[in-house]
Amino acid sequence: MAPHDDRSDVAEEAMVAEAEKRPIATIVIIIAMQTEALPLVNRFQLTEDLDSVFPRGVPWVRYHGIYKDLHISIIWPGKDLVLGVDNVGTVSASLVTYASIQALQPDLVINAGTAGGFKAKGACVGDVVLATDVAFHDRRIPIPVFDQYGIGLRKACSAPNLLKELNLKIGALSTGDSLDMSPHDESSILANGATVKDMEGAAVAYVADLLKVPVIFIKAVTDIVDGEKPTAEEFLQNLAAVTAALDQSVTKVVDFINGKCISEL
Ligand code: ADE
């Protein structure tokens, strides 16, 4: 293995600091479900990329275009090639985040989508939450240090002005590959202090952190995890209405971002 070079760390930090002072020009929005993505594709008048930046044969879809001063790409991981359902979850989310950052070199990644909310933390159906911290709840490795690795706690890009301007709720986001919540998941989610629970956020955070791209998380609550209703039923019942709330919030966030640099968020 090559020796670790402190000088390359310093150079990389200087590049990141420099980038934070330039107006944001290119954003990548990662959205797991087509139902969540299409209203925003229409809102920003994006078109599907027919000459794909992704490897041939993958189902990943990129919609892109210019909105105000921004080049926006919405990336949807597409549908499972055999089963025909949306490619939700951490595996597809990390793959498309990696491929999109490599191909498009965005100044900012946004992971937008729906989530389960915890009423004990004040979440209600239709709320839109800007996540401050993200972590996994289904990677339990009870060996010192591996336990922390499994949790994979990461911070979202700090955005105090965005928060003030848009009046969004804030909270921690916990990610796992299941829509339901096992008792094991529940105790990890509690330990993560989560207000919302999704199936992609911490995976997107991992890749964005690896490739040193700032990331924000916008999650709209479709179901109350610590409520009375069965999760899948409540999720499907509220998906369309909550997607409209997500669409409005993401548009406001993008309007706010336009013309600003990362350090002004
Ligand atoms: N997306 C919407 N609701 C969810 C839930 N309860 N868990 C994980 N992801 C979700």
Image: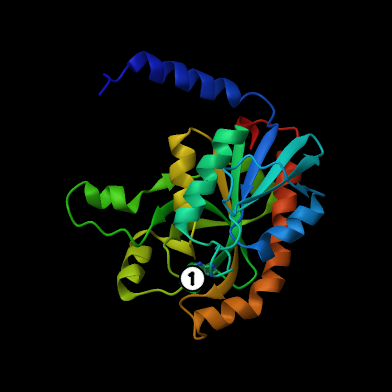
Find residue 36 and report its horizontal and vertical position in percent.
Answer: 67, 62
**Image height check: is 186 above or below 213?**
below
In the rendered image, which quarter is residue 67 located in? Answer: top right
Specify how the rendered protein is coloured: rainbow
Quadrant where the image shows the C terminus: top right
Residue located at (66% from left, 24% from top): 22
Give the residue type at disc 1: Phe
> Image quarter for residue 223?
bottom right
Is residue 77 visible in this depiction of the protein? yes
Q: Identify which residue is drawn at 43% across, 59% down.
A: 174
Q: What element carries label 1?
A: loop
4 left or right of 65 in image: left
Ligand 1 within 8 A of label 1's CB? no
The quarter of the picture where the N terminus appears is top left
- Of residues 129 and 80, the one nearer the viewer is 80
- Residue 173: image x %, image y %? 47, 57
Residue 106 seen in the figure? no
- Which residue is painted at 46% across and 22% down in the image? 13
Residue 79: horizontal and vertical position, in percent?
59, 62
- Relative placement, left or right, of 120 versus 71 is left
Mark 1 — residue?
A: 118
Q: Residue furthest left?
A: 143
